[in-house]
Image (cartoon, rainbow, N blue to C red):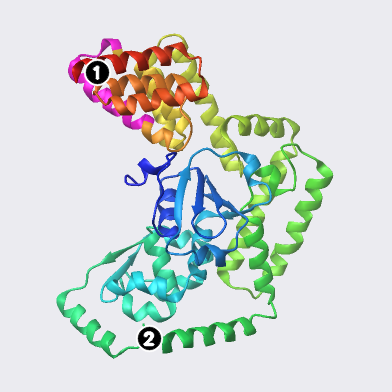
Amino acid sequence: MDFISPYIDSEKKLHIRFEKLFSLLSSCGFSGKINVLNSGEPFFIILSKGSVWTDKSMNLLGNLSKAALFKVESAVSDDMKKGMKEYDGKEFLFSVILSMPRERVLEVLKPYATEFLSIKPEAAKLFFLHDDLQPFVGQKRSEIFSNLKKSYRTIYFLLISQLAVIVQATDEERAKITEKLNKSDIFSEKAAAEEVFEKVAQEKKQEALSEEDEIKMFLNANEHYTDIFQLFGLKNKFDERVARREYIRIMQKIHPDKLVGISPNTALRAKDFLQLAGECYELIRDPEVASDIERLMQKYGPIRSKAEYLKIKEYDSAMMKATALAKIGSYDAAAKVFDFIYKETKNPAALEQKNLALWKLAPKWNKLEKADKYKEIRDDFVKISMIKELSFESMYILAEIYEYFEDIPDALKVLDNILKARPDDFRAAGMKKRMIYYNRLKS
């Protein structure tokens, strides 16, 4: 991620594989948009909280020209999402890889054909990958070559999404695999033709959807809802008639009576989703709770389940306690509570408030403490800015810290961002003028 950071919100363009760029940004929780340039008519996709919005086909994204360039911006609005379809981030990446040309995927994997693959446990949580992971289940490491023919796209997805790592083979193992590799035609045109033939045959076989296929399609279409209200076709307000109609529809699709004879994995998905829908329905039927959920969502973003509601309610109470401590001057105690909240929730707002509270203690720090704590606060603010916009108060502090470390170019960049948003900000203008003046004196 470090090498991408300078490209975010700059005029610089990235020349990188689309799937690699997407994976890097997703893994660090980036929210914003990827502008696709130099590949036909420019367009963009939006990333936010593990989801993706796009109106482009997977086939287009999977077949982007190698000459395509990208610009990354953190600024994004809800209006930009209009007319776009929402996808789960990891499922989206897998779909893009499924649409990529065979030779492009194998081009990346070929150097690793004589090595092994070790899959991380969290890969098992991805229901859409369940069938594709069957060849690897129960193995601590899998020989890549032996799985390339049928699972090379899955292997590429696991590696690029950091759900698997390459494990080097021993010299003896590598020699045996190389011998098999030399006798194989896995990278040949013949193998490519065989794959096309198998794909066509598989598509014909699936033309008539089974009952299990229908349930899978229903779950795929409904599991990735935005919030509790949207799950029942509502917009931040409870309507008994609409919610009941949607809840009955869910019940009819995945009632336990409909799950007889389908695979255990699909049955478990359906059972879990039905239980979640039931809990959510009972939750928002209470007007006071529905109103409370709406209030919390306005402050902290979407709430998708009863467990999330209870957790965010507790989090909101802790945030108010920490804010009250800061108001009465108990900055150290407030910082500790904000820090606890951040560690529990990874919410960047709590991390920002922690550092704002710590900054109030800065006049008491000696020279050694100041150097350590300034560095920590600077790094935290940079981390936060990758996910959400910093408050102006935080930006002033960040500029001061940059100045303290004599990093004047970065300090001026922060101040320019403030002045871009608030041209008449005398404080930022004064700080900028002072820094430029003293920087000239030193040089």
Residue 113: quarter of image: bottom left
Image spot of residue 147 (x, y percent): 37, 78
Q: Is residue 146 left or right of residue 223?
A: left
From the viewer's perspective, is residue 265 above or below residue 319?
below
Along the horizontal axis of the image, is 133 left or right of 314? left
CA–CA distance in space, label 2 to label 1: 63 Å
Name the element at disc 2.
loop
Q: Which residue is mark 2?
A: 188
Q: Amino acid at mark 2?
A: Ser
- What label sits on residue 303 in the rendered view? none
Q: Are marks 2 and 1 in contact (CB under 8 Å)?
A: no
Task: Kindly tell me whether residue 72 is visible in this rendering.
Answer: yes
Q: Nearer the viewer, mark 2 or mark 1?
A: 1
Which residue is tagged 1?
A: 440
- Find residue 248 and report its horizontal and vertical position in percent: 78, 55
Query: Which residue, as the protein is rendered here, is positioned at the far left?
Result: 171
- Say which residue appears at 71% left-offset and 69% top-offset: 258
Q: Which residue is at a point 50% across and 19% down the rendered structure image?
A: 423
Look at the magenta stretch and give its main secondary structure.
helix
Which numbered disc flags the more N-terminal residue, 2 or 1?
2
Q: Which residue appears farthest toward the right when viewing the image? A: 241
Q: Which residues are magenta?
A: 363-381
Pointer 2: residues within 10 angstroms few (<14), some, or many (20+)? few
Q: Residue at x 50, y 65 (%)?
A: 62
> In terms of secondary structure, where does tag 1 sit?
helix
Up the image or down, 6 lies above or below 153; here it is above
**In the depicted structure, whether residue 426 falls above or below residue 355:** above
Q: Quadrant of the C terminus?
A: top left
User: Is residue 126 or residue 196 the one in the foreground?
Assistant: 196
